[in-house]
Amino acid sequence: MTISWKTTRRKIPTRIGGSAISGRRRLLALLAVLLAAVSMGAAQDSKPKKGEAQPRSLSGTVSLPDGKPAARAVVLLENTKTKSIVSFYSQDNGSYFFRELSPDVDYRVSARLEDAISPTHTVSAFNSRKDIVINLKLEKKN
């Protein structure tokens, strides 16, 4: 008489939320949650590190030849590296602003309104100030 022992491996289901999930799936789900948490933490750490160049801002006022604020004057900002130009309309009080300017680039700024134009001012990459203020005075064209 031969006795044969038949052994079978029995899976023990783990119940989470009412459904059976294998160990491999549980591990993959845990890794996905950890990866999501790490990426969200990295996205929140957007402050520049010490020694890293911080973006600058440029602001000021545009005034008419008589000294009054120039509302709705077109302020032009030119990136001298890429030659791209960004424009901004001055506010009712003549103020304008540009944010997130690269500290490694020179910029030229000027303003126009009807038949008046301001002299062009340059913001140098060597200017280490974070907040730069340049007031623009419009002059009549000849």
Image: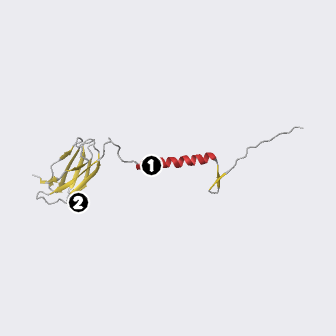
Nearest to viewer (mark 2 / mark 1): 1
Q: Which mark is residue 95?
A: none
Query: Looking at numbered disc 2 in the image, what kind of residue is underneath it?
Result: Gln
Q: CA distance from mark 2 to mark 1?
A: 38 Å
122 vs 115: above or below = above
Visual colour scheme: secondary structure
Sequence-wise, which precedes: disc 2 or disc 1? 1
Q: Position of residue 60 (x, y in %)?
A: 20, 54
Left or right position of 6 against 122:
right
Q: Position of residue 86 (x, y in %)?
A: 26, 50
- The answer to whether residue 12 is visible is yes
Q: Position of residue 13 (x, y in %)?
A: 68, 50
Query: At 59% from the left edge and 46% from the top edge, which residue is drawn?
Result: 27
Q: Among all residues in the image, which is located at the extreme left?
A: 142
Left or right position of 88 against 136:
right
SS class, disc 1: helix
The answer to which of 124 and 141 lies nearer the viewer is 124
Tag 1 residue: 41
Query: At 73% from the left edge and 44% from the top edge, which residue is drawn?
Result: 9
83 vs 91: above or below = above
The answer to which of 74 and 48 lies nearer the viewer is 48
Which quadrant: the N terminus? Answer: top right
Q: Position of residue 83 (x, y in %)?
A: 26, 43
Tag 1: Cα neighbours inside 10 Å, few (<14), some, or many (≥20)? few
Tag 2 residue: 91
SS class, disc 2: loop
